[in-house]
Image: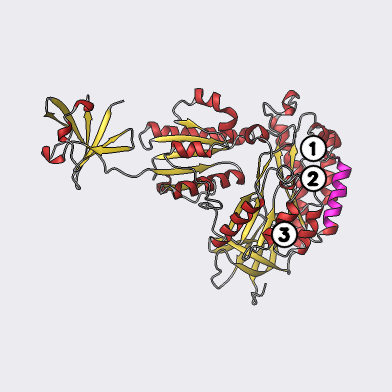
């Protein structure tokens, strides 16, 4: 690689390519001009006044050295674009990385699937850091496509560096290094200090809770643990993020307090398994204790629980949910299936009967609770009888919110040894069939809300109408309330809304006369 130098006199900037700069007479060095090597280091070199103003691409003789001078663009500071793919846990990692970079006085922006950046903004950077997802085939393909897009920008000279981190990189680094050599470096999910060092930044351990939020300022995700100790046969998460590691309670509280000081009103607690929290560092399940402490944080109005695990569910958290008013009556608990044959093949460590008993206990102890679950269609060996059993399970349990995935055959998982005997088309058909059952249940539940009043957190304004959520709805995955109001409604604030119309998954309402909520 050629050495190149940036010369300037305060008005013009010029690039010098020298065949042997180290042998230049050091008597020419002054403080008037700077040298750039390896993209970073600046030292003095030949004063600009030794040269007349050059035309395009001129060569000059200096002490028997040929110096070629090129006019260049104004030298700019590095600007890093963090592109986040996948789940909310990835989003938190990117926000923490952004906070670390900002603390190092570096220029950073955050691009995610929320589409918060304009096209011109998305091109206003010279370093790309892609935080990838490697969970299922569709997510992996999206990550690869994004990497290739950034590599193409690098080839075209529009950006200088491409770095890749996250789950896909952790899982397939060796293969990806061979397939996409244009990427400058690859990092796993637990290698933020090394990534920061590569970006010429220091990892600052003291920055607890310091994040550059990519969400609207009134809500944020808070990750309470990393990894998972479960052995579900369909899941590749332990391969990418390792075993369960709980975050110390004091650190979580500090992070929550910091988020509230930044204007956050709603915190969504996330983990691969929320209900396992504490077993590794406190030798007992401590989610109930954590919830009580979080509920004491002044200014925190909503606390939402995501990703509880049904097996060995800590029932003591239900009393806390019922008693603490700022803990939403909302529980996200993926069940995955209802057929005992499939549950056993998935190694879910629970039976259908045990799930039904648990659901009954949850509803008895927390009246009016909204239960969200996710399911998998097309697991190896799933029969038509299994599908019908799952559909009847939905009819009987009448979940408030349901999401569904089609099974993805992932190497390294327990189920990979099974024959993936159901076609993609059939998996999709089964998923649609199951969701049609839930569509009807959701519509009936929404109809029951007409005429009632709800406390709504206003998230945004689109097409002249405000859009918000009840405490029974999480961001992006659940229902929204479309709000009509003749007056301005502040984004990020709570309003009292009367529901006037219902759809399968959304509601319409009007702001009530009184805002007493």
Circle 3 is placed at which residue position? 292
Q: Is residue 422 magenta?
A: no
Q: Which residues are magenta?
A: 351-363
Is residue 475 in view from this perspective? no
Which residue appears at 86% of the width and 36% of the height?
A: 340
Which residue appears at 63% of the width and 69% of the height?
A: 495
Which residue appears at 51% of the width and 45% of the height?
A: 97
For the residues labelled 1 and 3, the Cα–Cα distance comes to 29 Å
Q: Is residue 360 magenta?
A: yes
- Marks 2 and 3, the one that precedes in the sequence: 3
Q: Quadrant of residue 289?
A: bottom right
Q: Main secondary structure of the magenta part?
A: helix
- Marks 1 and 3, the one that precedes in the sequence: 3
Label 2 crowd bin: few (<14), some (14–19), many (20+), radius 10 Å = many
Q: Secondary structure at mark 1?
A: loop
Circle 1 is placed at which residue position? 348
Across and down, in percent, residue 140 comes to 59, 33
Total count of labels: 3
Q: Which mark is residue 333?
A: none
Q: Quadrant of residue 462?
A: bottom right
Across and down, in percent, residue 467 comes to 60, 61
Across and down, in percent, residue 75 comes to 29, 42
Depth check: 124 or 53 in front? 53
Circle 2 is placed at which residue position? 310
- Is label 2 or label 3 in front? 3
For the residues labelled 1 and 2, the Cα–Cα distance comes to 9 Å
Which residue appears at 55% of the width and 62% of the height?
A: 261
């Amino acid at each position: 690689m050629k050495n190149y130098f940036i010369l300037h006199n305060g008005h013009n900037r010029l690039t010098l390519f020298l065949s042997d700069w180290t042998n230049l007479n050091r008597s020419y060095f002054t403080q008037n001009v700077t040298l750039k090597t390896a993209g970073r280091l600046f030292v003095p070199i030949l004063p600009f006044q030794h040269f007349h103003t050059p035309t395009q691409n001129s060569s000059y003789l200096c002490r028997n050295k040929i110096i070629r001078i090129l006019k260049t663009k104004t030298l700019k500071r590095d600007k890093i674009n963090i592109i986040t793919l996948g789940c909310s846990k990835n989003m938190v990692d990117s926000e923490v990385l952004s906070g670390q970079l900002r603390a190092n006085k570096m220029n950073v922006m955050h691009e995610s699937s929320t589409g918060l950046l304009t096209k011109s903004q998305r091109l206003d950077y010279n370093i790309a850091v892609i935080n990838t997802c490697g969970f299922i085939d569709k997510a992996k393909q999206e990550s690869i496509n994004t990497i290739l897009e950034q590599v193409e920008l690098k080839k075209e000279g529009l950006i200088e560096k491409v770095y890749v981190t996250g789950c896909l990189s952790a899982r397939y680094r060796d293969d990806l290094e061979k397939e996409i050599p244009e990427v400058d470096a690859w990092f796993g999910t637990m290698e933020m200090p090394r990534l920061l060092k590569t970006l010429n930044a220091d990892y600052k351990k003291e920055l607890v809770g310091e994040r550059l939020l990519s969400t609207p300022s009134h809500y944020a995700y808070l990750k309470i643990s990393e990894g998972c100790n479960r052995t579900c046969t369909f899941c590749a998460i332990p391969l990418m993020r390792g075993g369960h590691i709980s975050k110390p309670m004091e650190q979580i509280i500090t992070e929550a307090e910091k988020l509230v000081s930044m204007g956050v009103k709603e915190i969504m607690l996330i983990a691969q398994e929320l209900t396992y929290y504490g077993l590794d560092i406190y030798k007992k399940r401590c989610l109930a204790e954590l919830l009580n402490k979080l509920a004491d944080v002044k200014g925190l109005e909503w606390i939402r629980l995501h990703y509880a695990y049904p097996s060995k569910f800590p029932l003591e958290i239900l009393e806390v949910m019922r008693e603490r008013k700022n803990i939403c009556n909302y529980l996200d608990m993926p069940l995955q299936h209802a057929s005992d044959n499939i549950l056993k093949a998935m190694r879910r460590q629970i039976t259908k009967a045990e799930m039904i008993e648990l659901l009954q206990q949850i509803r008895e102890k927390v009246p009016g609770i909204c239960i969200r679950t996710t399911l998998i269609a097309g697991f190896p060996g799933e029969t038509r009888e299994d599908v019908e059993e799952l559909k009847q399970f939905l009819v009987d349990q009448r979940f408030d919110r349901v999401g569904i995935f089609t099974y993805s055959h992932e190497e390294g998982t327990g189920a990979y040894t099974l024959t993936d005997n159901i076609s993609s088309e059939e998996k999709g058909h089964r998923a649609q069939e199951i969701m049609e059952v839930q569509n009807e249940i959701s519509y009936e539940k929404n109809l029951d809300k007409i005429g009632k009043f709800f406390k709504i957190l206003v998230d945004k304004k689109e097409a002249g109408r405000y859009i918000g959520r009840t405490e029974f709805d999480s961001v992006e995955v659940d229902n929204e309330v479309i709000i009509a109001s003749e007056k301005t409604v502040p984004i990020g604030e709570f309003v009292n809304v009367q529901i006037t119309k219902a759809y399968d998954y959304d509601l319409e309402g009007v702001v009530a006369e009184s805002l007493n909520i």
